[in-house]
Amino acid sequence: MARRPVDMGDPDRLYTVTQGRSRPDDETFDLVTLVVSECEPTAGMQSEHLRILEICRHPTAVVEISAELRLPITVVRILLGDLQSTGRITARHPRTARSFIDLPDSALLEEVLHGLRNL
C-alpha cells in the first residue's frame, strides 16, 4: 500500500478561514484542553465556527475537534480563540498533580479498580 502525503488542506482556504492569521493570539488551547459550547450556533456564523459549537455540545478535546474538522491544530486554535473571545465557548484545562503527595493513594485506586471489576 502506497503512503499518501499528509493533506494539510488548501493553503488559500486556510488563509481565508483564519482571516490571514497564522498563529493564535495566546497559548490557551493545548491538545488536551476540553472545550464546551456556551450557546447555540446563530445565522451568519462562519461554517467552521458553527461546526465547532455543534461538536462541543459535550466537552471535547482540541485534538478531537481538529480531527473532526480535518483542519490543522493551529487553524483550530485560532478559531477557538475567536469563539472564546466572544464568550461562545469555555475551555477546561485538565488538572495535573502538583506533586507526588497530591496523587491519590494507590490502595484507594486499587479498591476502586476491584469495585469496578465486581460490577
Image (cartoon, helix red, strand yellow):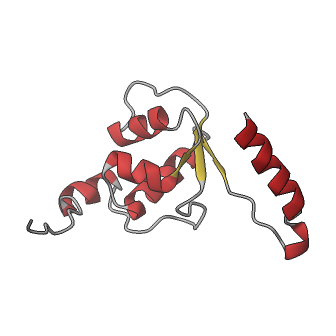
Query: Residue 99: x, y in percent?
Result: 85, 75
Where on the picture, by quarter, is residue 95?
A: bottom right
* Left or right of 88 in this view: 13: left
In percent of the image, x 21 and y 54: which residue is there?
13
Q: Nearer the viewer, residue 117 or 78?
A: 117
Query: Residue 27: x, y in percent?
Result: 58, 67
Position above or below: 93 against 51: below
Position above or below: 48 against 19: above
| Residue sitting at the far front | 118
Where on the picture, by quarter, is residue 108?
A: bottom right
In percent of the image, x 45 and y 50: which residue is there?
64
Position above or below: 98 against 117: below
In percent of the image, x 40 and y 53: which residue is there?
66
* Left or right of 99 in this view: 41: left
| Residue sitting at the far left | 2
Query: Residue 68: x, y in percent?
Result: 36, 45
* Residue 12 appears anywhere in the view: yes
Query: Residue 54: x, y in percent?
Result: 45, 32
Quadrant the N terminus occupies: bottom left
Q: Nearer the viewer, residue 61 or 17?
A: 61
Quadrant the C terminus occupies: top right
